[in-house]
């Protein structure tokens, strides 16, 4: 079977299937999320896809009222802010994602270390060209 | 393992430095801003020179494609200042663009290829509405995995702030004291975007409320004013408006020459004795969120090349795009211990203009403004003026500044440039 390449498009394809996939180095076992084709630990390019549990914990976050265009289009603004954070998944690596189910009205209540699970959220693409920005994509999120 | 020396092939000195006024500049474009900086630089060269002797240009610019729908800004700037028919490079590394441009200019001279180089940067940012500028800046982080997750620039640094607060007990007031300090410096800088202290801003708000007949707010001090969300709203929690640098138009440039030629331009050349640069991964891929590994490494390389240490630096201009960024910067370059010591340095007056380690006496990015592609060069303009005793009212006077440092970050730490300067 032909190896699915370790690209952004492949990762996004898995998200569409509601799967959180990492790449795992077959030489040193290091796990990479987001996936990458070359292992920075040992420089091997012998990778395999590995599905993650989707469970993790919040390690850093922010609550944003002035977002980029795709977040505005998704309905977020000063009166309806969203949380973006860094999640450490239980398998080890960290990833950036929108964080759902936290108290965006009072960010002081959001605690680092909060357990979260993967969610999959559809919104417009990141692009300056309006026609391309309209294309919907599935993005990784986590829910507290 | 290859043994690397990391030494310049020959010495390089700054003999001229200039910048445009920073601020919202509606009627000028990148190339015109660059020409303003160029003319200011020409006036700074003590013994005069023929600008046609300049052999190459290195122009830092982050996003003219996005802000001005214009690429190839290097050649356009060269043409604008009358220096056609020579290499003119546009250099892009987000907010470190012009430090990288200057560094490349240094390498060009050190290699022996050039004797005279013009290096700097320009950025015109005020063209787009805020949403689009937010988007343009966020293009500096990883659009596939960071910005598209919803992270803006204030948001990425806010995440670092939450990690810093969690790990070290840093408070938001610690961060706000960085803004108060940098505004008190920038108030004395006639080229700053907002040349006013936080107290000036506060009094202005009170006057405005009186004028409009609104209820007049009363704040005990600057900190209480900055803690009032009606006047200092959250941008990306915990970053408030006054934790963030403004969106600014501006340009800055330097005349770099081979060291042996320096004295024919001025009796007070500023020698670049150390330069370091390093890249870094996305924020989520870092072992720690409370320091920038690339900045630490760039500082290490710069110190090693210069043969000096953090204790020798008499002042520094560091990358304070957000207040937390200065807290991290002064630890990454080794001035203060990471954590509480760095977080409280501004509040304790250690980094004030008359403190033990003056940091951002220009007002920093916070108050002077942050035209991203011009910022690194503008830091060097400040160092040039301070080291030559030409910084006017904001001159550091409690010491002789014979050694100084600049620290410039690209994006959220994916590029870092640290340089060390000496006046002999």
Image: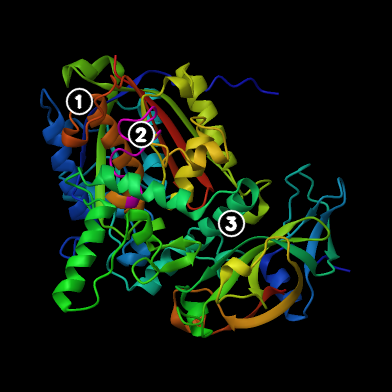
Q: Are the residues flagged by discs 2 and 3 in contact, CB closer than 8 Å?
A: no
Q: Is residue B150 above or below residue B318?
A: below
Q: Is residue B94 visible?
A: no
Quadrant (top left/top right/bottom left/bottom right) for the N terminus of chain B: top right
Label 1 environment density (alpha carbons within 10 Å; few <14, some 14–19, many ≥20): some
Of label 2 and label 3, which has the lower sequence position?
2
Label 2 environment density (alpha carbons within 10 Å; few <14, some 14–19, many ≥20): many
Provide the secondary structure element on which disc 1 rests: loop
Do the residues marked 2 and 3 share a common chain?
A: yes
Do the residues marked 3 and 1 share a common chain?
A: yes
Q: How is the image coloured?
A: rainbow
Location of residue B320 in the rendering, given as x and y in whole percent from the top left corner: 41, 47
Q: Quadrant of residue B376?
A: top left
Location of residue B85 in the rendering, given as x and y in whole percent from the top left corner: 23, 42
**Is B148 on the left-hand or right-hand side of B330?**
right
Magenta range: B350-366
Q: Is residue A132 above or below residue B160?
A: below
Q: Which mark is residue B389?
A: 1
Residue beneath the point at 73% across and 80% down: A16
């Amino acid at each position: 079977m032909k190896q699915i390449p370790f690209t952004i498009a492949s990762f996004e394809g898995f998200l569409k299937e509601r799967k959180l996939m990492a790449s795992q180095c077959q030489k040193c076992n290091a796990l990479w999320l987001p996936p990458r084709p070359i292992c920075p630990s040992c420089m091997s390019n012998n990778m395999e896809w590995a599905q993650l549990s989707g469970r993790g914990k919040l390690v850093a976050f922010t609550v944003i009222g002035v977002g980029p265009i795709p977040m505005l289009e998704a309905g977020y603004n000063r009166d309806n802010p969203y949380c973006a954070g860094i999640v450490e998944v239980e398998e080890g690596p960290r990833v950036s994602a929108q964080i759902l189910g936290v108290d965006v009205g009072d960010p002081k209540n959001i605690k680092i270390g909060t357990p979260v699970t993967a969610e999959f959220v559809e919104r417009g693409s990141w692009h300056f060209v309006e026609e391309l920005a309209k294309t919907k994509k599935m993005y990784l999120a986590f829910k507290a | 393992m290859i043994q690397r020396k990391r030494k310049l092939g020959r010495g390089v000195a700054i003999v001229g430095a200039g910048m445009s006024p920073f601020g919202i500049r509606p009627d000028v474009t990148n190339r015109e801003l660059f020409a303003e900086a160029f003319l200011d630089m020409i006036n700074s060269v003590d013994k005069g020179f023929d600008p046609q002797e300049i052999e190459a240009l290195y122009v830092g610019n982050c996003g003219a494609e996005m802000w001005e729908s214009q690429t190839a800004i290097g050649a356009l700037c060269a043409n604008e200042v009358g220096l056609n028919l020579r290499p003119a490079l546009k250099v892009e590394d987000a907010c470190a663009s012009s430090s990288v441009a200057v560094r490349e200019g240094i390498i060009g001279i050190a290699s022996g290829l050039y004797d005279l180089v013009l290096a700097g940067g320009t950025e015109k940012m005020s063209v787009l509405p805020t949403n689009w500028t937010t988007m343009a800046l966020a293009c500096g982080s990883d659009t596939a995995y960071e910005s598209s997750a919803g992270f803006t620039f204030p948001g990425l640094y806010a995440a670092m702030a939450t990690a810093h607060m969690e790990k070290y007990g840093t408070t938001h007031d610690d961060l706000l004291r960085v803004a108060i300090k940098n505004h008190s410096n920038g108030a004395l800088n006639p080229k700053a975007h907002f040349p006013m202290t936080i107290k000036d801003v506060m009094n202005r708000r009170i006057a405005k409320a009186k004028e409009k007949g609104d209820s007049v707010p009363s704040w005990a001090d600057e900190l209480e004013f900055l803690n009032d969300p009606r006047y200092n709203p959250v941008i990306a929690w915990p970053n408030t408006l006054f934790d963030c640098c403004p969106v600014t138009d501006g340009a800055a440039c330097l005349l770099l020459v081979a060291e042996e030629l320096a004295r024919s331009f001025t009796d007070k050349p500023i020698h670049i004795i150390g330069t370091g640069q390093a890249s870094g991964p996305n924020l989520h891929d870092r072992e720690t969120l409370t320091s920038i590994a690339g900045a630490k490494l760039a500082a290490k390389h710069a110190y090693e090349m210069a043969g000096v240490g953090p204790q020798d630096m008499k002042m520094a201009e560091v990358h304070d795009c957000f207040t937390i960024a200065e807290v991290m910067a002064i630890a990454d370059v080794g001035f203060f211990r990471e954590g509480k010591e760095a977080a409280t340095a501004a509040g304790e007056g250690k980094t004030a203009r008359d403190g033990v380690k003056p940091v951002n006496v220009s007002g920093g990015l916070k108050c002077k403004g942050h035209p991203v592609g011009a910022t690194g060069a503008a830091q060097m303009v400040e160092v040039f003026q301070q080291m030559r005793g030409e910084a006017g009212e904001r001159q550091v006077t409690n010491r002789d500044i014979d050694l100084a440092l600049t620290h410039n970050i690209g994006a959220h730490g994916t590029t870092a440039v640290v340089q060390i300067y000496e006046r002999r």
